[in-house]
Amino acid sequence: MASSESSTFLDRAQSFISENKRVILIGAAAALAVGGVAYYASSSSRPRAQPDLEKGTRKEKKKGSKGGKKKKTVKDVDGPILEEIVPPKPKVESEDPLVDTPLTSEQIAALTTEERADLARKLKERGNSAYKERKFNEAAVFYTRAIQVTPNEPIYYSNRAACYVNMQPPQYDLVIADCDEALKLDVMYIKALNRRAMAYESLHRYEEALRDFTAATILEKFSNQSTAQAVERVLQLLANKKAAETMATRTPRLPSFTFIAAYFSAFRPRSLPTLPENPSTGDNTLLLALQALEASNYAHALTLVNEAIDQGISWPQGRAEGLNLRGTFKFLVGEVAGAKEDLLASLEVVPGFTQSLVKLASVHMEQGDATSAFKCFEEAIKFNENDPDIYYHRGQVYFIMNEFSQAAENYTKSTQLDDSFVFSHIQLAVAQYNGELLLDQQRFEDAAEKFDRAIELEKLKPTPNVLPLVNKGLALFQWKKDIGAAERCCGEALRIDPECEAAVATLAQLNLQQSKISKAAEYFKRQAELARSEPELQNALTYQYATEAQAEFLKSYPHMAGQLNALAQSLS
């Protein structure tokens, strides 16, 4: 189908790295370092810490945690996940007057270091006991007293944050404040990162939640599925929210010249209609719209066809043509429902208008309804079984569905019906799709030759379609791992058409492959600006926010860069 040409290249640009590496992409998260795409997986557990009561210092104890293991909660019979309640402590004695009676700051200052450490431990144990009994307010008081006695122990802040999470209603702002304090004392405190992330998520502060979940994921060396799922979930929530907000205020606009040219070039050119003997103003305006389309003046064609329909087109074939063209432009700007309405109206006027049926199939595919799309093709064949357009676009649908043999069969059928159509008007599209079939068959050298031939054909046009350049770059990367050549191809494509979405998406991925995180984020942001529809925007924003979260991690944990590279290499 015609619309699949540019969008298929975008999909391939997004996925080409993972096709060649043993890595997992969750939530469309982007590569963190040279050699691979990041597998977002992490554990919500952290290295355990117990105070050394004799010396007043912290000693780290690592606790194993399997990714699929269910987390304990306060409702479990053996208590909540609090690092410091394992191993079990002796039953807390209640006779200690220092524990039972709050101390003034002067009294606390008078205690020795050992006395303060011992008192803080006892207060923490009382807090743990209250927590297990679901007395969260009481537990929070004991943790607060422990903090007053020993304010440099992050565990006490984290445990008090756990109390705030479980209060009714939860006190998420206090959770964040306590986790802030814990992380000031221990920047590697993964439990605090996860707790703060969950609080941010509950407050719909998704960018901050993503930042913390991403940091926890990396610090835990991608070892636990629970945080992987959190990253995926928050990315989806964030991208969907931002995409909906953007689309609600964005004025519909045409996509890039490359995208539009790719769409229209995939249909046989047809003679301009003969106007009635006494044409109306709308009839004449329609003719001007079709002439502007022939001249690739798409913005003018859109304006004129809207005027023609408003003015009134006097004869049936003209009305069908006008509705077909307006529906096409609506489809191109992402107004799928309006496109469907216009194409159906066109078919009501001229039921045998095969081009409207083929374009309606594009609309159904955009809506994820392949069954209805194939019904449109079958209906078109009933009206004109010798129309090459039908088989060409049906071949593209098969291609999207990875049914490559059926795709090739339909392309061949289209060629057999009209050699001149294929080779003089849409040979580019056929060459590209033959090349894409070769890419999927790992025949990269043959694919590169196909794209070279397509590039030469495009040079003969006043405004060339740059998609062959993008596909050649992709083929060179997959074939020779030649990032430089791939970047040059995409750079040339953007020089010719600065709004080519496929080139922008591919350059974003190539920058990720080289650990140029900030540069990749810029390209993903540009891809979001160029997105035509809400699903495209959601996809671009997912990459953008994932990449930005990783860039934030590298700023906060610069000492982790080397370990991150080594880890990415081990996953590749």
Image: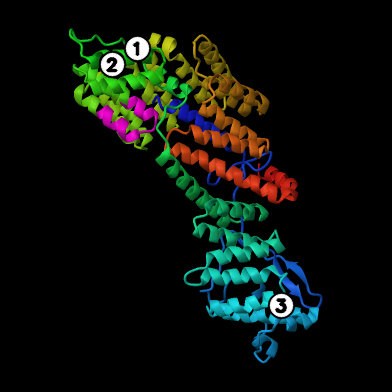
Position of the C terminus by quadrant = top right
Report how far apart the C-alphas of labels 1 and 2 lie in the structure.
9 Å
Indicate which disc, 1 or 3, sits on the residue closer to the N terminus: 3
Q: Amino acid under label 3?
A: Val
Q: Residue 367, labelled with which disc?
A: none
Q: Is residue 482 visible?
A: no
Q: Label 2's element?
A: helix
Q: Where is residue 381 drawn, in percent x and y?
A: 27, 22
- Crowd around label 3: few <14 · some 14–19 · many ≥20 (10 Å): many
Residue 44 vertical position relative to residue 549 in the rendered view, above or below: below
Indicate which disc, 2 or 3, sits on the residue closer to the N terminus: 3
Q: Give the residue at mark 1.
A: 291
Relative to residue 12, is residue 361 drawn left or right? left
Task: Locate residue 297: give its quadrant.
Answer: top left
Residue 112 vertical position relative to residue 554 in the rendered view, above or below: below
Q: Count how many numbered circles sit on residues in the image.
A: 3
Please report the bounds of the magenta region as a residue range: 327-344
Indicate which disc, 1 or 2, sits on the residue closer to the N terminus: 2
Q: Give the residue at mark 2.
A: 286
Q: Where is residue 84 drawn, in percent x and y?
A: 67, 73
Q: Where is residue 455 drawn, in percent x and y?
A: 54, 15
Report how far apart the C-alphas of labels 2 and 3 lie in the structure.
83 Å
